[in-house]
Image (spheres, helix red, strand yellow):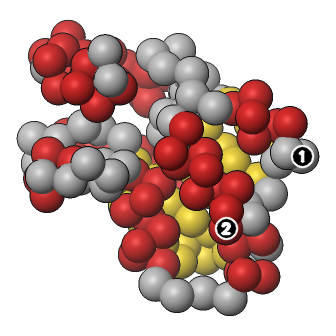
Amino acid sequence: MDRFMQAAIDEARRGYEEGGIPIGCVIVHDEQIIGRGHNRRVQQGSATRHGEIDALEQCGRQPATVYRESRLYTTLSPCVMCSGAIELYGFRHVIVGENVNFIGAEERLRSLGITVDVLQDETCIELMQRFIRERPELWHEDIGK
């Protein structure tokens, strides 16, 4: 497995172990992780702290060129909010662990010329399915159902 997707999965597991939603993300520039995060909506009582947003926050302030030259790895298809951040910061390549449990705004990203690769990684799929079985109310809260 790609070491960067593995790092995103490690973040997702960390979120799950903290009692949160198991979605992890890493941002990679020049083959180095410059930001990592996981969904912290539950842990921080936040409406917006999705994995991608958390990873961006952990990057700190970066020049726009850094984001354009970076890849974003996320364990689950990015929602509309996170896709908006991907667009805003100018990422050109997103690697998604899975979109079996949720399909976000991938087609919108593609329509903007952003490369979106979906791995359908079994670890990502199974972790999210386990979470949905165990905490359906929290899952539905997060995706607005």
Which residue is painted at 78% across and 82% down in the image? 65
141 vs 31, nearest the viewer: 141
Which residue is painted at 61% across and 45% down in the image? 83
41 vs 119, nearest the viewer: 41
Amino acid type, callout 1: Gly
Q: Is residue 10 visible?
A: no
Which residue is painted at 61% across and 76% down in the image? 32
Q: Position of residue 104 (x, y in %)?
A: 57, 28
Amino acid type, callout 2: Tyr
> For residue 120, what is the image quadrant?
top right
Circle 1 residue: 113
Q: Position of residue 125 (x, y in %)?
A: 44, 21
Circle 2 residue: 89
Identify the image quadrant of the N terminus. top right
Please report whichever mark, 2 or 1, sits nearer to the chain's N-terminal start: 2
Compared across the picture, whether 70 is left or right of 59 comes to: right
132 is higher (above) or lower (below) than 30: above
93 vs 32, nearest the viewer: 93
Give the class, few, some or many, for how many residues have Cα within 10 Å of label 1's Cα (few <14, many ≥20): few
